[in-house]
Image (cartoon, rainbow, N blue to C red):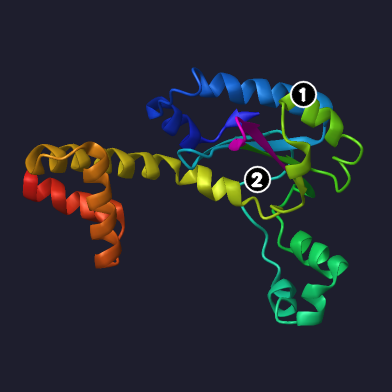
Amino acid sequence: MELLPQSKEALDEYVTPSVDDVEGLLRVIEGWAVRTVPECVALSVTMLDDDLTFTLVDTDAGADLTVAPGREDAGARSDDLHYLMDEGGWAEMARERAFAGIASTICLPVVEAGRAVLNIDLYASTAHAFHDRIDGLVAALGAWQAGAVTNADLGFDTLRRAQAAPARLREQRLVDVAIGLVAARVGVTTDDACGMLEQAAEEAGITEAQVAAVARVLLA
């Protein structure tokens, strides 16, 4: 599998004290995933503390995993309450909205000290790829079996989040700079400065990054 270009870009800038080598972690997960589920064509790992997602895709899978197929009838069916409430109907609609090349998925949370720190999402090209293989994946990846969820992301939403990761990192750097400026100018701790930015964003109805941009201009 190959790293999504945006994941490569984000990994060049991302530093976390919890993982020394994020790309190395991705490759270890890839190795175990492909050995356990040969039909695996993509995987995403989300660092929950930072809400950042990194994605690997199989460029030889025979389908473009970055383009979703259009399904006109799926939208119409979403208005049918009885169809949505039926488990079989829900699964069928999810598959109709799925990305080309993805027929089944599984999300495996990794828990440390009683809290989830990672989400591992695996994507396979066949509908029953994960059948009878969940135990092996849980054991290999150190995941929380009770939290495993299948076919919840046939639309490959983690791809969108991975594509947004570089922008999220840029916004976070902007916020970090603004926090430092506010802390120095007002004479408060960085935690207090962070709270001030959060409150200002909430009161103004804008994002923290937008508040940070204004603060940086006014205080720099």
- The x and y percentages for residue 204 are 24, 66
Q: Residue at x 30, y 62 (%)?
A: 202
* 111 left or right, relative to 124: left
Instruction: Estimate the x, y position of residue 219 in percent, counting from the top left.
Output: 7, 45
Q: Quadrant of residue 4?
A: top right
Q: Mark 1 falls on what kind of element?
A: helix
Q: In which quadrant will I find the C terminus?
A: top left
Residue 13, numbered label: none
Q: Which amino acid type is marked by label 2?
A: Leu
Bounds of the magenta segment: 107-118
- Viewport quadrant of the N terminus: top right
First in sequence, mark 1 or 2: give its number. 2
144 displayed left or right of 119:
right
Q: Count residues near mark 1 (Cα–Cα under 10 Å), then give few for <14, some for 14-19, many for 20+.
A: few
Q: How far apart are the alpha carbons under marks 1 and 2?
A: 25 Å
Residue 57: x %, y % from top left: 64, 36
* Amino acid under disc 1: Ala
Mark 2: which secondary structure?
Answer: loop
Residue under label 1: 140
Q: Which mark is residue 65?
A: 2
Side of 6 where 197 appears, left or right:
left
Contact (Cβ within 8 Å) of mark 1 with mark 2: no
Please identify the dominant SS of the magenta region. strand
Q: How many marks?
A: 2
Q: Residue 81's image quarter?
A: bottom right
